[in-house]
Every structure is written in C-alpha cells, then in structure tokens.
Amino acid sequence: MTEENIQETVENVNADAPAVSTNLLDADPEIRRLFKVRKVQKGKKPSFHKQNHHKFKRLTKAWRRPRGLQSKQRRGYLGKGAIATVGYGSPVLTKGLHPSGYDEILVYNVDDLVLVDPEYEAVRIGGTVGGKKKAAIVAKAKEFNIKVLNPGKEE
C-alpha cells in the first residue's frame, strides 16, 4: 500500500472518530470499577510454579499441574506452593486489556495502523522493529490519534 492509499483508508475509517480518543475506562464507570477489582485480585494472586522447580536446574518455572499420587503440592500442604484454581481469575470484561483500558494491537509496520480503531485499541510496536521504522510508526500513529504503548525515546 502506498502512503496516499493508507491516508485515504484511515480518513474513511476515522471519519466519525472523536478528536481525542477515548477508551473503556472513560466510557463506562462499571468497567473502571472492574479494573480496580482486577488490580486488587492480581495483587493477592500468588505466582504459580512447577513443583520442585527450585530443586532441579532442568525444571522450568512454568506452571504444570502436579499429578503424582503422593504429591504434597497436589494435596495442598502449606509451604509447597499454590495451585492454580478457579477464583484467581480477573473479571471477564477486563481480560486481555491493557491497564489503560485499551485493547492491545501488535504492529510491525505503518500499514498495520489502518486496521486500528483509535477509540478502543492501542498499538504496541513489535520488538523486532528497528529505530527508523519505529519512528515512522509513532509519527503516523500520532497523526491518526492512536495511542502507542511503547513509543521509546523521543528525540
């Protein structure tokens, strides 16, 4: 896609968009309350690790449910680590959303910005994108009133 095609497409898509983008936190007080609940719940949630990961170097920390018959962790002994169960989850309406209230969209080039709805979505630039392209993406995003979650250093 050429620069002009992108500009025309974005203008057509964003014709009804407000001058300053909003997000779910601004739109609904119930969502704002659920984000506060999520923050409290995540603070109380333990970190779930594989059983005996600290004893053997070959074991990763990544969570796997203990299944052994004599497993102390499976049987719920104190001090053996928590098990991921129902009740540790976040509210459904806030799952997968950035703490700012936007839905994250991963972007690797300027063309990907065409698919973004600035009212509800924010952009995260991919880690493999270089400095020049990142600067171009940030400039275009500012032009289209799209929030960039990792803009980097501005010079």
Image: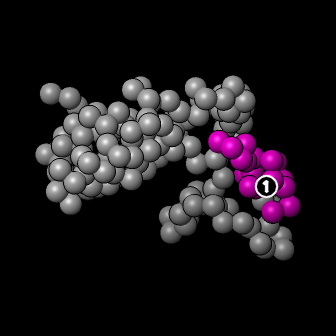
Q: Position of residue 66 (x, y in %)?
A: 74, 67
- Majority SS type along the magenta span: loop
Q: Where does the C terminus fall, quadrant-wise?
A: top left
Q: Position of residue 73 (x, y in %)?
A: 78, 59
Look at the picture and state if 94 lies above or below 72: above
The image's colouring method is one colour
Q: Is residue 7 left or right of residue 20?
A: left
Depth check: 95 or 66 in front? 95
Which element type, helix, strand or loop, lies under badge 1?
loop
Q: Is residue 127 visible?
A: no
Which range of residues does the magenta coloring cover?
74-94
Q: Where does the N terminus fall, quadrant-wise?
A: bottom left
Q: Is residue 33 visible?
A: yes
Task: State the residue position of label 1.
Answer: 85
Q: Position of residue 89 (x, y in %)?
A: 73, 47
Examine the structure image and report whether residue 13 is included in the region drawn in magenta: no
Q: Identify which amino acid the numbered label 1 is placed on.
A: Thr
Q: Is residue 17 left or right of residue 108?
A: right
